[in-house]
């Protein structure tokens, strides 16, 4: 068989094989390309016979070799495109959407119950013209204790032992330092100071289920002219009703805090039994919800506020305690463990 016939046969058989390749065997196309057009492929082999041809025939056959190469190269490209399209088509068919299948549920998160309570209380106070002020969780001993009328040797510091970064830097035990810092800057020519400060605070851990080494607080402070205990009671009554229901009553019991004088513990009438006595109120009809009092004159003076001219009240409540009461939560650790079975209950 002469070289020209062999070339023609190679062209035809290659084209036939190309046509026969199916979409699912697309890689056979590449194998065939190497076999025919590759460096060691059939066409190259035939090319080697060129040197044995008579001189005058070589250009003619050489031209034919190039033509066959061009034709086949083009054929490979075309077939490659056809196969790729067929593959996409097959994939589309296999992935067709069954709209009758039930959809997958995407679970949507919710705000943490402590944040919900914080925001709820913030809203109440914003409505009464208070400002909401943030502060530092890492504080100076000076602002955390001394400015709250708790000098270094004061025994009441024991109740609020905390984590010390250095002798004078600590994790704050209450949000009161924010109040001292805000009072320092307040311009009384523009009216009284009315603020709340929500945030995380830290104390020595106590070995029971209702205390944790960290918890959340909202403390409030009002300082101005003629601020009285009556203003404090009215404010607390309003908060209690908004938080625990319109029928709630409050009562004040004398207490002690170094930074207020007089100081009170505030009880709210039980929202579960209405005062008859139940497990929530430990059969007393009353639930302790917060501490409060009239700002100690020394605390005002330390901020450069004249305690003869100005007076004020302060109060502090805990978001964990409110959530535990309201939702009957027994163990404070539930708030911090991030277990969605716990957090999702408060959607
Ligand atoms: Zn009760």
Image: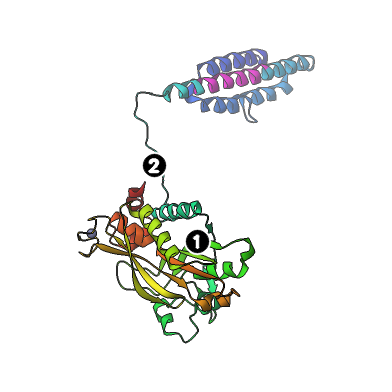
The residue carrying pointer 1 sits among few (fewer than 14), some (14 to 19) or many (20 or more) residues within 10 Å by Cα, namely: many
| The N terminus lies in quadrant | top right
Q: Which residues are magenta?
A: 71-87
Residue 150 locus on image (x, y percent) = 48, 81
- Specify whether residue 217 is in view: no
The residue closer to the viewer here, 50 or 75, is 75
How far is mark 2 from mark 1, CA to CA? Answer: 34 Å
Mark 2, residue position: 107
Horizontally, residue 208 falls left or right of residue 70, namely left
Prevailing secondary structure class for the magenta stretch in the rendered image: helix
In this rendering, position of residue 44 left or right of residue 324? right
The first of marks 2 and 1 along the sequence is 2
Which one is in front, 18 or 245?
Answer: 245
The picture places residue 69, in percent across and down from the top left corner, at 67, 20
**Residue 124 x/y as whole percent:** 45, 53
Residue 207 figure quarter: bottom left
Secondary element at image label 1: strand
Give the quarter the ligand 1 occupies. bottom left
Q: Residue at x 59, y 25 (%)?
A: 33
């Amino acid at each position: 068989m002469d070289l020209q016939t062999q070339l023609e046969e190679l062209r035809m058989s290659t084209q036939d094989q190309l046509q026969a390749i199916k979409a699912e065997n697309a890689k056979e196309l590449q194998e065939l390309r190497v076999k025919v057009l590759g460096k060691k492929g059939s066409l190259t082999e035939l090319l080697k016979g060129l040197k044995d041809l008579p001189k005058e025939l070589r250009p003619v056959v050489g031209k034919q070799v190039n033509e066959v190469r061009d034709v086949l190269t083009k054929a490979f490209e075309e077939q490659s495109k056809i196969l790729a399209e067929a593959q996409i088509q097959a994939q589309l068919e296999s992935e067709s959407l069954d709209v009758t299948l039930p959809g997958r549920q995407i679970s949507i998160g919710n705000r943490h119950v402590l944040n919900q309570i914080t925001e709820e209380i913030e809203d109440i106070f914003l409505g009464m013209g208070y400002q909401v002020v943030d502060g530092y969780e890492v504080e100076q001993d000076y602002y955390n204790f001394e400015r709250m009328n708790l000098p270094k040797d004061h025994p009441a510091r024991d109740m609020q032992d905390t984590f010390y970064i250095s002798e004078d830097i600590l994790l704050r035990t209450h949000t009161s330092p924010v109040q001292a810092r805000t009072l320092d800057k307040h311009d009384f020519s523009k009216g009284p100071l009315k603020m709340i400060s929500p945030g995380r605070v830290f104390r020595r851990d106590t070995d029971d289920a209702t205390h944790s080494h960290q918890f959340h607080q909202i403390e409030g402070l009002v300082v101005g002219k003629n601020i009285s205990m009556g203003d404090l009671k009215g404010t607390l009554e309003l908060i209690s009703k908004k938080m625990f229901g319109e029928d709630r009553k409050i009562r004040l019991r004398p207490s002690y805090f170094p930074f207020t004088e007089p100081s009170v513990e505030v009880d709210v009438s039980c929202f579960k039994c209405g005062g008859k006595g139940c497990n929530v109120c430990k059969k007393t009809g009353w639930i302790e919800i917060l501490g409060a009092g009239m700002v100690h004159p020394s605390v005002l003076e330390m901020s450069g506020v004249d305690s003869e001219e100005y007076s004020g009240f302060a109060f502090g409540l805990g978001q964990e305690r409110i959530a535990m009461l309201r939702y009957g939560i027994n163990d404070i650790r539930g708030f911090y463990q991030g277990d969605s079975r716990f957090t999702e209950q408060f959607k």
